Image: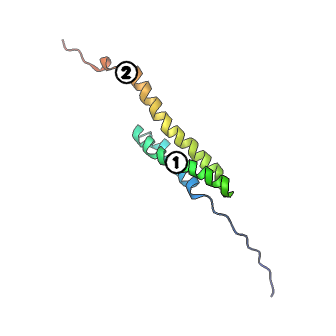
Amino acid sequence: MNENIITTKREETNTQAILSLIFGIMSLLGMMFTLIFGIVFALPGFILGIIGLRKTSTTNQPGRSLALAGLICSFLGLILPIIIFIITILLFTPSEFIMEVG
């Protein structure tokens, strides 16, 4: 019973890329509750996405697409709350919130 067993070593996906995608998705989902959650989760996701992209480029480690998707989700999680806040300020001026008595 001399069987040759061929084993292949599976490369692990870049951890920073996976975390970037998780934080990016959490930032988009967190915006449903409050805009601050979007920014809080997007900052580490954006940083981890950049690190993940650099590591996957230099080491040819799998996960480049995950890092890119995480970077895009995190970018949206950073920009959308700011845009929503600016639009809210421009559309609803403080004078509309003042109740007239009389």
Give, as a three-letter code, the residue at label 2: Phe
Q: Are marks 2 and 1 in contact (CB under 8 Å)?
A: no
Quadrant assignment, res 2: bottom right
Residue 85, placed above or below residue 22: above
Estimate how packed mark 2 is, as few (under 14), some (14 to 19) or many (20 or more) residues with alpha carbons within 10 Å. Answer: few
Q: Secondary structure at mark 1?
A: helix
Q: Which residue is mark 2?
A: 92
Quadrant of the frame with the N terminus:
bottom right
Residue 57, placed above or below residue 98: below
Q: Is residue 34 visible?
A: no
What residue is at 41 percent from the left and 25 percent from the top? 88
Q: Earlier in the sequence, mark 2 or mark 1?
A: 1
Q: Secondary structure at mark 2?
A: loop
Give the colouring mode of the picture: rainbow
Residue 79, placed above or below residue 29: above
* Relative depth, front residue between 62 and 30: 62
What residue is at 63 percent from the left and 63 percent from the top? 12
Compared across the picture, whether 73 is left or right of 35 comes to: right
Compared across the picture, whether 5 is left or right of 59 comes to: right
Q: Which residue is mark 1?
A: 47
Q: Residue 65's x, y, as percent? A: 65, 49
